[in-house]
Image (spheres, rainbow, N blue to C red):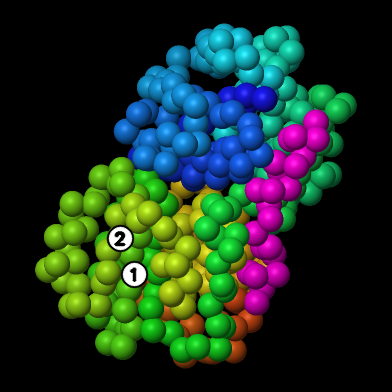
């Protein structure tokens, strides 16, 4: 079977969509399926993608839902694909009805339950996702819902990671704001916390390859890092880096599931609107502290919460345990099994 992946990714949108599509495609490849990526530009491809995707079809511009859906149908015929995976929130009802008329089956990632949905499979890994939210938006009676963090798509490396020991003291803080434009959040966190945290605490920073702030980050770390900051740009393996840290300060996107899997207490700062609900829910479940939307974060708010967490071992342990109970690392496999069953 050939599966088409229609994915939206860019420095502005971020790369969470592409990361989970890549992880899902990799799992399908292990089952012997053929995968084709459609959408991201060629510069977003990694060397390992040659083994994951049979073809990579860039679509630099989005003109309309109708035109994009027609292109996808044409590509499905070209590659003899019976299934598609849509990880693009621009997909509307017009788009879906075009696929349905062409008798193409598809899995669709959703995060809001606010628009009409016709997919065969709907995946929403948000912690608060509930079937009742979809009662008025599902129009395909055969749709199957895959909801909650048990359906979170993790990279294979995180599925096998050994969670950190929640009893160990804080020696390293992870700082990461996704694979795209961090909007200056990394530099804000570092410049705020370096002068205000103990010199025994280091910072490990992970930035994506297309972050436009990378050059200035390299210069900033060299000038002001005091030997306490390690900057990794597009590291080949992130799981061991995550697991080597003791607290995460990060955006509220898809990486929160990976941090929870590693047992990291999280301090979350949204840099995009679609991260707010996820961040708030992690806080409600006791796995995170949500500070709000960047750039509207006061330096004292960030500093006080970090220092309080550094001093409170019991709270760190409670937050780590709360995160680990929500994630078991098998979400990708559950989705693959559901897709192949259909």
Distance Cα–Cα, label 2 vs label 1: 8 Å
- Count residues near mark 1 (Cα–Cα under 10 Å), then give few for <14, some for 14-19, many for 20+: some
Please report the bounds of the magenta region as a residue range. Answer: 321-342
Residue 232: mark: 2
Which residue is more in the foreground, 339 or 256? 339
In the rendered view, tell whether residue 41 sits above or below residue 228: above
- Which element is circle 2 on? strand
| First in sequence: mark 2 vs mark 1 | 1
- Count residues near mark 2 (Cα–Cα under 10 Å), then give few for <14, some for 14-19, many for 20+: some
Q: Is residue 105 left or right of residue 140?
A: left
Q: Residue visible at 44% across and 21% down?
A: 57
Circles 2 and 1 in contact, beta carbons < 8 Å: yes
| x then y, percent, for residue 101 | 73, 9
Identify the residue at the far front of this view.
32
Residue wearing tag 1? 204
In the rendered view, tell whether residue 194 sits above or below residue 90: below
Q: Is residue 108 left or right of residue 60?
A: right
Q: Main secondary structure of the magenta part?
A: helix
């Amino acid at each position: 079977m050939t599966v088409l992946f229609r994915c939206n990714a860019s420095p502005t949108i971020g790369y969470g969509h592409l990361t989970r599509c890549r992880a899902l495609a990799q799992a399908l490849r292990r089952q012997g399926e053929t995968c084709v990526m459609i959408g991201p530009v060629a510069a977003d491809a990694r060397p390992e993608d040659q083994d994951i995707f049979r073809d990579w079809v860039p679509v630099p511009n989005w003109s309309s839902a109708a035109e994009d859906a027609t292109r996808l149908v044409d590509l499905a015929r070209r590659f003899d694909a019976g299934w598609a995976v849509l990880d693009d929130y621009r997909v509307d009802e017009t788009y879906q009805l075009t696929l349905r008329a062409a008798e193409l089956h598809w899995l669709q990632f959703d995060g809001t339950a606010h628009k009409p949905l016709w997919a065969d499979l709907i995946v929403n890994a948000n912690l608060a996702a509930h079937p009742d939210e979809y009662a008025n938006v599902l129009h395909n009676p055969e749709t199957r819902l895959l909801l909650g963090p048990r359906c979170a798509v993790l990279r294979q490396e995180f599925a096998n990671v050994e969670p950190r020991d929640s009893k160990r003291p804080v020696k390293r803080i992870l700082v990461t704001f996704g694979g795209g434009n961090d909007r200056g959040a990394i530099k804000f966190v570092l410049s705020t916390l370096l002068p205000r945290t103990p010199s025994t605490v280091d910072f490990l920073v992970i930035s994506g390859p297309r972050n436009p702030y990378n050059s200035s980050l390299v210069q900033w770390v060299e000038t002001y890092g005091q030997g306490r900051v390690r900057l990794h740009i597009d590291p080949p393996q992130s799981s061991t880096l995550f697991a080597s840290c003791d607290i995460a300060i990060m955006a509220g996107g898809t990486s929160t599931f990976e941090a929870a899997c590693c047992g990291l207490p999280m301090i979350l700062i949204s840099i995009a609107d679609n991260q707010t609900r996820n961040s708030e829910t992690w806080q409600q479940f006791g796995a995170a502290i949500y500070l709000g939307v960047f750039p509207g974060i006061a330096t004292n708010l960030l500093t006080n919460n970090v220092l309080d967490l550094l001093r409170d071992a019991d709270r760190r342990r409670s937050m780590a345990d709360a995160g680990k109970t929500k994630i078991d690392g098998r979400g990708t496999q559950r989705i693959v099994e559901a897709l192949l069953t259909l």
